[in-house]
Image (tube, rainbow, N blue to C red):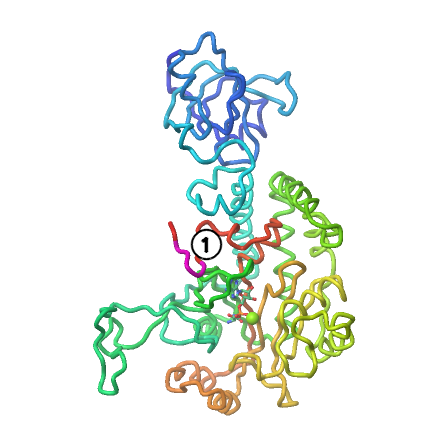
């Protein structure tokens, strides 16, 4: 069979399958997911989870073409769209001609129509997007990012691009990736024998940003309400299912907002984005829901989630988050069964200790059985910029904790009083000189203001039910791993 004319436009499957009654003769382009019985091609072009069944008349098709219809090959197919007699699809294409656009040798193409482990697929991260699971996850990721921009845009927030290379350490955590052009083998040294960053590209030590917050604050103090949405980098050696060295963060910053308004916005924001995918990603979510329930069945009974994926998302959208102060949370944890029976790895003994993920999960999954916003944390365990409460012990911080994920949002009301901020910076041993511009904001027209950061991949994890954060970002960066 030879290819005829190219007069017709080709269609993306998402349009073709949703309005199939409008089409008769079609051209489609995509990749072979499977080829059964020398007759049935399952074709997918990435625009939807659904494959298009294309029926080949093998008697009329060259042997040389048939041999090349292998999983992974790229094809262009022209044919008649007809109602399908078979099960599993409403329409199918009776193939008139096939062009093999790109071959895929079945002896070496790694993605076969069978179940591959996520570990295996991480090593094939350049091809894993051809699997149903990853294409669903990444379509949802894309729809979620759009929803995020839409939410803030509809509210009149200004989108600002904060720098990726910075000269400041926003979180004061010191877990940063240095950006340098100095000769690694033989860097120039200063008189004290340390690396002389004056000789470096920027004339000072610079790093990849851990957060766009401080720069976003400057813009909020002129534009009112702003948000950033960009990549952030942390050199923490946390090899967990919730940590990446490079992840994306959404950080709104609002002038004249106190902590309660900040919490209201964060809750509304999360619900909006999740509701958006319930509306727009039904097919992908249904597939991931089924995938998750199959996975759950392999777990012991007591570790299985009582809710399915879609049910969990709806639960978040339809219920209020529980707001609890750190102090009350500590009381709950102290009296909790796992604390009394010494089941926690880190026992809660006194006020002031940082919460570990086992504690956060107990509060969310066992005690409240709902997302929790914890607020008013001890100042000792939080960043320098958070507003001091009148008790002089706690700051106006808030963390949002999610079932199965733990911390998804970290935020606070910011310290707007110059003297209080300066004394906090000194106490924490941070170099005040570096923050001169940040302190200027408190000198000129300072206002109460607040903001938060939402870890985008953790939201995608929750929305897709993927248990490992490495499987919700195209090319994960983690300790010892920056392939691709
Ligand atoms: O709590 P964090 O460190 O807060 C900040 O960076 C503030 N400057 C945000 C702000 O107020 N504008 O980080 C915010 C969120 C966390 O709650 C978590 O969801 C995510 O970022 N996050 C990570 N996600 C993936 N991998 C990591 N290593 C992460 N570290 C933080
Ligand atoms: Mg945090």
Q: Residue at x 75, y 54 (%)?
A: 302
Q: Quadrant of residue 126?
A: top left
Q: Nearer the viewer, residue 194 or 271?
A: 194
Measuring from the top left, give residue 135's x and y in whole percent: 52, 41
Residue 229: image location, x then y, percent: 48, 61
Q: Is residue 352 above or below residue 289?
A: below
Q: How many marks?
A: 1
Element on which disc 1 rests: loop
Say left or right for 320 vs 459.
Answer: right
Q: Seen from this angle, which residue lies furthest top?
A: 59
Compared to 481, does 234 lie above or below?
Answer: below
Residue 1 among those drawn in magenta: no
Ligand 2 quadrant assignment: bottom right
**Which x, y percent locates residue 410?**
57, 70
Quadrant location of the N terminus in the rendered image? top left
Left or right position of 327 against 111: right
Name the residue nearer the viewer: 25 or 297. 297
Give the main secondary structure of the magenta stretch.
loop
Q: Position of residue 120 (x, y in %)?
A: 49, 44
- Which residue has dot 1 on it? 476
Picture layout, residue 287 above or below residue 303: above
Front-most of residues 189 and 407? 189
The stretch in magenta equals: 478-482
The answer to whether residue 80 is seen in the rendering is no
Q: Is residue 202 above or below residue 57?
A: below
Q: Quadrant of residue 206?
A: bottom left
């Amino acid at each position: 069979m030879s290819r005829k004319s190219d007069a017709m436009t080709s269609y993306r499957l998402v349009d073709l399958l949703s309005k199939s009654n409008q089409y008769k003769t079609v051209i489609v382009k995509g990749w072979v997911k499977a080829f059964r019985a020398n007759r049935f091609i399952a074709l997918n072009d990435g625009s939807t989870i659904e494959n298009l069944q294309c029926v080949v008349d093998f008697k009329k098709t060259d042997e040389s073409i048939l041999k090349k219809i292998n999983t992974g090959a790229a094809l262009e197919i022209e044919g008649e769209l007809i109602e399908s007699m078979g099960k599993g699809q409403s329409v199918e294409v009776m193939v008139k001609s096939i062009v093999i656009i790109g071959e895929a040798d079945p002896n070496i193409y790694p993605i076969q129509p069978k179940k591959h482990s996520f570990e295996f697929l991480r090593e094939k991260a350049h091809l894993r997007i051809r699997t149903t699971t990853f294409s669903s996850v990444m379509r949802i990721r894309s729809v979620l990012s759009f929803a995020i921009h839409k939410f803030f845009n509809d509210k009149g927030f200004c989108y600002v691009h904060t720098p990726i290379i910075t000269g400041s350490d926003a979180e004061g955590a010191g877990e940063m990736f240095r950006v340098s052009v100095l000769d690694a083998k033989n860097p120039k040294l200063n008189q004290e024998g340390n690396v002389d960053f004056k000789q470096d590209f920027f004339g000072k030590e610079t790093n990849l940003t851990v957060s766009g917050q401080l720069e976003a604050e400057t813009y909020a103090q002129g534009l009112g309400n702003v948000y950033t949405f960009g990549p952030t980098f942390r050199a923490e050696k946390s090899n967990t299912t919730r940590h990446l060295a490079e992840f994306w963060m959404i950080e709104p910053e609002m002038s004249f907002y106190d902590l309660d308004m900040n919490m209201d916005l964060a809750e509304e924001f999360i619900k909006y984005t999740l509701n958006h995918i319930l509306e727009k990603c039904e097919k992908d979510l249904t597939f991931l829901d089924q995938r998750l329930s199959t996975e759950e069945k392999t777990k012991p009974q007591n570790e299985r989630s009582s809710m399915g994926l879609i049910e969990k998302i709806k639960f978040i959208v339809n219920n209020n988050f529980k707001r609890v102060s750190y102090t009350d949370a500590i009381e709950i944890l102290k009296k909790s069964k796992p604390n009394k029976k010494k089941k926690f790895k880190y026992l809660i003994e006194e006020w002031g200790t940082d919460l570990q993920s086992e504690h956060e999960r107990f509060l969310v999954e066992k005690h409240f059985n709902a997302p929790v916003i914890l607020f008013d944390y001890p100042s000792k365990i939080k960043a320098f910029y958070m507003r001091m409460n009148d008790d002089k012990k706690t700051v106006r911080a808030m963390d949002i904790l999610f079932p199965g994920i733990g911390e998804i949002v970290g935020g606070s009301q910011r310290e707007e009083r110059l003297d209080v901020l300066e004394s906090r910076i000194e106490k924490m041993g941070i170099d005040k000189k570096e923050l001169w511009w940040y302190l200027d904001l408190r000198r000129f027209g300072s206002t109460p203001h607040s903001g938060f950061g939402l870890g985008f991949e953790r939201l995608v994890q929750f929305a897709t039910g993927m248990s490992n954060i490495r499987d919700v970002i195209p090319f994960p960066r983690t300790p010892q791993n920056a392939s691709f």
